[in-house]
Amino acid sequence: MENLKLNNENLSTISERIAVPKYNRKTLKTGIVHIGIGGFHRAHEAFYTDQLLQDESIKDWGICGVALLDFDTKIYNTLKEQDGLYTLIVKELDGTHTKRVIGAITEYLFAPENPTKVIEKMASPDVKIITLTITEGGYNYNEATKNFDFTNPLIIHDLENPNAPKTVFGYLTQALQLRKERGLKGLTIQSCDNIQGNGHMTQNMLLSYVSKAEPGLTDWIIENVSFPNAMVDRITPVTAPEDITHLKETSGIDDAWPVVCEPFKQWVIENNFVAGRPAWENVGAQFVENVVPYEKMKLSLLNAGHSVLGILGALMGYNTIDEAVNDHELKTFLKNYMDVEVTPTLGNLKGIDLEAYKQSLLERFGNVNIKDQIDRICSETSAKYPIFILPTIQSQLEDKGSIQLAAFVTAAWAIYSLGTNENGDALNIKDALKHELYKKAIEAKQNPTAFLKIESVFGLLKQNTVFSKAFVNAYEDITNKTIETNLITINNLFK
Ligand code: CS2
């Protein structure tokens, strides 16, 4: 089989090998600008939109993918070379791969190269929605002050250079200002990140920035822009070199950056779109009035579950989430964490079978085919912890419930931040706060609660004596005994 480079020209030959978009991509209008074209966007929103576009009467919802950071040059160049096309490889539970070429990204822009082009695109009258996957840390929210972080050097840069911004806030402000000046309609800004109340967060952070950058725009935004909350879900590991080779060997497709993901997907969205929206419900998304309970459930069970497996698994020497969850003691610990500490905080989840949901998470984590990297899960824990784990602890402390398991994970993170696992192997720590975490982890060796001093992560948790005590005990236990031995002891307590 001849290897074919993935691009428009080869698409019809590729269609003899795997599914390709049947719709006419050239005639699509760009109705969505998306910032952050990483794997998750390509496995989720772009996939849903591609499915929808199979109905050729739909012409308004092509996506323009924006690579925002200097560091995103690789994805931009790949999309450019491949005419926006990429292969989505769904790794099914039975080990088979379902592959299809996704065509929903019809335009792509590299913001550092041409900021004006990006601002003009966002201000285009055809664009009705700007969607974001800018990661948990991208919202520039400080847990300690509960406010927008104006000390961030990139924000300072954007305030001084409004026409050549670097952050999403700078771009949005310029684009909205243009729309206002030109008398255009407002639009929807839709977060697709794992944050509780992600729409509210986007709105609050943007309005904070605008209050300094362009105060006269505030009222216009309040009246003309909507910010739906949403829960997004699809496990999307980092593409491995073997995925690229495998695609070539099995289908003869030369794709520089295919995306791999699990079969499961979910998107629950608040129906709050001021300028219209694609009928994503026709391809499986759910539109609801209040998404908060769904978000909370997902963040504190799935995402926190990932962090539990990631942090403890990394220390135990595991490399992937399936290896970690297939460790009997670790799985039991995670189940206890979900049942004893998270479940009581979730309130009444009308219409949701929580037991089935938790069971399905364990199955998804255990999918041996997707090989989700522990390194991916542990990256940027300092931005994830305040969203995935801290709210559970706070709520349990208020209700005088158990926090022992969360304290154990937190203490394990302090040990993890020292940089080696239990076998003495170096850990590959990727975190914006890496140096601060290390510094506090070293101090913690003398005085464990020093680790809890990082207020942007832990808020005022350090002052809570119940939590501090549990944290110190767990820290000492982990220093004295292996994680596995500790897990056995803890699991026995919860039998
Ligand atoms: C993960 C998420 O980043 C993480 O730590 O928990 O990327 C997770 O895989 C997705 O949210 C699944 O929907």
Image (cartoon, rainbow, N blue to C red):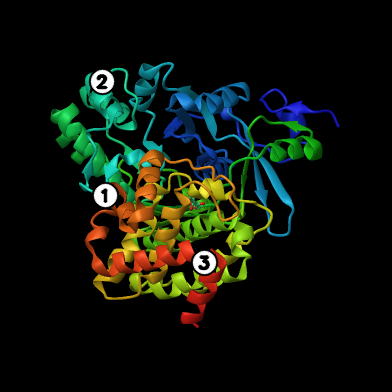
Q: Nearer the viewer, mark 2 or mark 3?
A: 3
Mark 2 in CB contact with mark 3 (< 8 angstroms): no
Circle 1 is placed at which residue position? 455
Residue at 26% x, 20% y: name it: 162
Q: Nearer the viewer, residue 126 or 407?
A: 407
Circle 3 is placed at which residue position? 481
| 482 versus 43 height, above or below | below
- Farthest-out residue, bottom: 495
> Which of pointers 1 and 2 lies earlier in the amino acid sequence?
2
Q: Is 251 placed left or right of 464 in the picture? A: right
Check disc 1 and report its element: helix, strand or loop.
helix
Mark 3 in CB contact with mark 1 (< 8 angstroms): no
Residue at 28% x, 43% y: name it: 141
Circle 2 is placed at which residue position? 162
> Which of pointers 3 and 1 lies earlier in the amino acid sequence?
1
| Residue 373 visible here | yes
